[in-house]
Amino acid sequence: MNLSNLQPAEGSTHNQNKRLGRGEGSGKGGTAARGHKGAKSRSGYSKKIGFEGGQMPLQRRVPKFGFKNINRKEYEGVNLDTLQLLVDNGVITDSVSMADFVANRLATKNEIVKILGRGELKAKLKVTAHKFTATAKAAIEAAGGEAVTI
């Protein structure tokens, strides 16, 4: 082996690029394999998302309807039967707060929690949450507990 017959190891090089626009002798001179004229032959061309060759794009053909309220608050609902299940399993005893919801993966720390009235609550609990439905609040107080709004 000497300097005249050195070559890279098999599979170690991957560069098989066409050298475009390097003269007519290369076979890729002139238009540099881009064809003649048109947007795709120009430098800086990028197709817009949803572009359909000048045809009216789908997102403009389809009718729009409805309304999105930008001030909408998205609540994470926790039902009374879920709270009762936590009591039955011995996870909570006398009070439930935001930390307990996060620890039991019922909500994340940034979510707003609303207690909903599905199921029945037999345990006396002090429930601390952002919002309560009327039925949930009544059920908590009927069981001897307390509903505290954050």
Image (cartoon, rainbow, N blue to C red):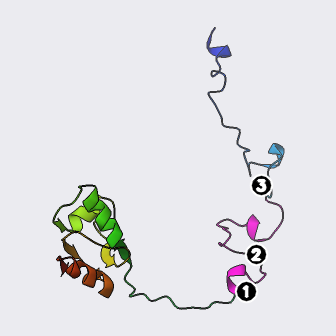
Residue placed under numbered mark 3 in the picture: 32
Q: In this view, does 12 lie to the left or right of 32?
A: left
Task: Determine whether the residue tagged by mark 2 lies in a helix, strand or loop.
Answer: loop
- Residue 41: say if magenta: yes
Which dot, 2 or 3, sits closer to the camera?
Answer: 2
Residues tagged 2 and 1 counted as in contact (Cβ below 8 A): no
Q: In which quarter of the image is the N terminus?
A: top right
Q: Is residue 36 left or right of residue 59?
A: right
Q: Is residue 127 left or right of residue 9?
A: left
Task: Give amino acid for label 1.
Answer: Arg
Q: What stretch is highlighted in magenta?
A: 32-61
Say which mark, if any, is on residue 52: 2
Residue placed under numbered mark 1 in the picture: 61
Residues tagged 3 and 1 counted as in contact (Cβ below 8 A): no
> Is residue 150 in sight in this rendering?
no
Q: Out of 28 and 89, give the one closest to the viewer.
A: 89
On screen, residue 99 above or below 127: above
Res 106 → quadrant:
bottom left
Q: Earlier in the sequence, mark 2 or mark 3?
A: 3
Q: In which quarter of the image is the C terminus?
A: bottom left
Task: Give amino acid for label 3.
Answer: Ala
Task: Determine whether the residue tagged by mark 1 lies in a helix, strand or loop.
Answer: helix
Q: Earlier in the sequence, mark 3 or mark 1?
A: 3
